[in-house]
Image (cartoon, helix red, strand yellow):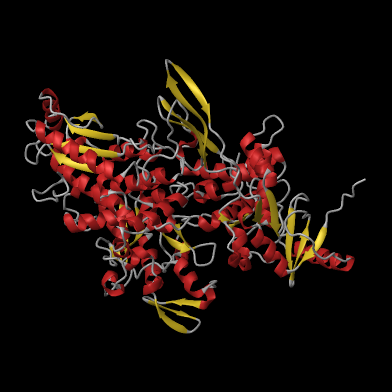
Amino acid sequence: MVNEENWEPKIVAFLCHWCSYAGADLAGVSRIQYPPNIRVVRVPCSGAVNPLYILKALREGADGVLVSGCHPGDCHYLSGNYFARRKFFLLKELLRFLGIEEERVQFSWVSASEGQRFSQVVQEVVESVKRIGPSRKNIKEFVFHV
Amino acid sequence: MREITMSKKWISQEQFRKRLAEKENHLAITEKAQKVHRQFLSLGIKMVKTPKEILFPSWKEIYRFFFKERSWEIQEVEEKAFSDPTFLLLLPCEARAVVEVLDTNFLREDYRDTDYARRRAGLKLVILGCPTQHPTCFCHLVGGSPVWRDGKSIFVLPWKERFYVENDETLFGEGYPVSTEEEREIESWEKALLEKLPSPLPPDFPEKLYAHFEDPEWQDIAFRCINCGACTFLCPTCYCFDLTVDGKLRGSMLRTWDSCMFPKFTLHASSHNPRPTGKERVRQRVMHKFSYFPLREKHYGCVGCGICREICPVNWDIKEAVERMVKRIDSRCDIN
Amino acid sequence: MYEEELHRLSVKLLDEVECIIGYTSGTLPFRSRPFLCRKKEDVELLTFNHFSGSNLTRYLLGKDLQKKKVAVLAKGCDARTITVLLREGQIKRDNVVVVGLPCYGMVSLRKLEKHFGSLRPQDFTWHLDTFTFQGKNQSIGPFLEDTCQRCLYPNPPLFDYLAGPRVEYVPRERWKEDSLRKLEEISPEKRWELFAQEFQRCIRCYACRNACPLCYCKECFAEAQRPYWLSPAATRSENLFFHAGRALHMAGRCVECGACERACPLEIPIALLPLKVEELIREHFAFEAGVSPDREPPLLTYRENDPNEFIK
């Protein structure tokens, strides 16, 4: 569908409000440059991210999904990210088992003070998705462009 | 003046195989036909589960819509070039499903489904007469037979070492003429075959079944059904579909197969559901095929292929259900 | 398998319960089907053989049977389902009498057909872990369903009565066939090719979901309109979404009974996804569904040293 040379990946980023979203905000305020390929969805906690959201993002045409939360032990809701860790592990391994590229769905722990680090994470994610090309396996068959 | 007799000819084994190999890309065969005619397995013809895969595919984008500059735009979906097979090899029961049920539904006098009409016009049915009955078959019960044909499609009957072919101008080429003696031999074989078949359902069965709507037997009959959609999706006559809007500001209208066995099939917008449990839905399936449809269209909505019985995960059996209702009707129990 | 004992037990049970959910022979060769036995005269119709593959605990969730006291015949895996259902509050222990069936495994008709060609029931005599075909004795191992070849619980861990002698071996250790391991040994691209082909074939009939006793949601995510996750279209990517989503919903709950795979009318090896998730849970979270009723389900708990390397 989008097979031009200057294809830019679209990455949906689920960021937890208390840590990663604040970290992204800090990166913005500090004028740290990072690739504009991510579209941010703010969630209260990484534990609130239903694995189905990730599959839905891929279905609608996201080339990559990033989910980022607080570091283990620092969750605003105490244990949300611990539960999230187990869910994400299962999702990642299941997708790998199915043969979906590992770079499509990535996770990170980024705290509110790690603005620089957030931009680095985004850089890595965008580069890795660029390397594997546009999403073909998960995208719905009746997507079209106007 | 054109003669209205059907063309008949003999085709040898080698010519049969040769012509099928030549037309490879234009052929398809149904799975049941391949099971009954095991010798065709080696021909490697593309297999479809039901004729519906070609005539009425399981999903289709009807149109696309998007919101642009404060108004909605509708876009037609370009039909891909018709690359579907032009000849479908199938059994008499499946052919009856196409001609008597699917055609009746999609090619009505008041409305012709354009997509179905186009696909149907581009498809020629090749009916393969059944030499033996499969354990799942019960076509005789619903007015069919192992050698049914509609007079318009090609008909092939394996006969001793050759194939007896009716009504073919395009597929098998020149054959050997059929002598009157041979014709009579085949006719008498067919007649004997039809006489040996068990009798069909009594002619007033659709009406009598209608009167047994509230029969408590339905609760028992419906017990093991798990309400999936396997039977309806693989049934050659089932034609129900659903329309789904996929997307919000940009998306498509999809037509997909729907199943009366799904709980949401009759869910009203008010949240009332007239068929809330499995019993109502199972009853509906049997009543539609053996009562409502035949009362309206004069032939059964079931062709007796038995595919549903074979693939049902719990071996729920529509033939058994019908026979149980026949017994209930015969025992003349008064429900009211 | 030990049908006489089963009949004797069932006759006694009918004094205690309103009905017995069991198996009986089907209307087609080799088939077995769920059967509701209410009268003592019908007890003779109860069977249990190598084709009794349905997970009968599914019928315990029906509204009309929930209020009555019923007995259910449960193989090893099915009895595990009961533990999970009890834990999730879907059935009441007092209303259910569990008749445990030590199980030697379910035979796959597809594998039999592949090996022997067209099948006739009269050519086969079935014993426990062997069968006789036209006079020759054979082991059932190579012909068992994939889920049964890797089974770890042939004996029910939960039962009120045991209808037969225990199975003395663990099938996974004896048959040494693991369809999951085989798949993990091939490259991810090859795996994708295989899965893509299977997802392309799936018609979204939901036989797998409906055959599973643990899929009891009033409205499945696959059919929901609010929120709208996926369309009913049976395309490769939609089917991938559905099956991956269902496997994740079964995480920590799937008892590896294989009823989903046996239900599939297109013979798609659909159990591979929930089986993979259960193996991951077994390996990394040390949990097996339906075995220890007091253990916390894996997604409701955590450990400090859970796998973390995949997170940046």
- Looking at the image, residue B70 lies above or below residue C43: above
Q: Is residue C134 above or below residue C293?
A: below
Query: Could you tell whether B278 is left or right of B2 in the image?
Result: left
* Residue B155 position in % (x across, y down): 74, 57
**Residue farthest bottom in this picture:** C135
Q: Is residue C301 left or right of residue A52?
A: left
Q: Which residue appears at 47% of the width and 19% of the height? A: B72
Whole-percent x, y for residue A31 in the image? 12, 24
Residue furthest top in the image: B70
Above or below: residue C161 compared with residue B251:
below
- From the viewer's side, name the closer residue of C262 and C51: C262
Q: Point out the image quarter for the N terminus of chain C.
A: bottom left
Outermost residue, right direction?
A: B1
Q: Residue at x 85, y 64 (%)?
A: B177
Q: Is residue C209 left or right of residue A131?
A: right
Asked whether residue C196 appears in the rendered view, the answer is yes
Could you say which quadrant of the image residue B304 lies in? bottom right
**Residue C37 seen in the current view:** no
Marker count (numbered): 0
Judging depth in this view, the residue of C59 and B40 nearest the camera is B40
> Relative to residue A12, is residue B143 drawn left or right?
right
Residue B331: % across, % down: 65, 51
Quarter of the image where the C terminus of chain C is located? top left
**Residue B255: image location, x then y, percent:** 52, 36
Q: Nearer the viewer, residue A135 or C105?
A: A135
Residue in front for this viewpoint, B10 or A73: B10
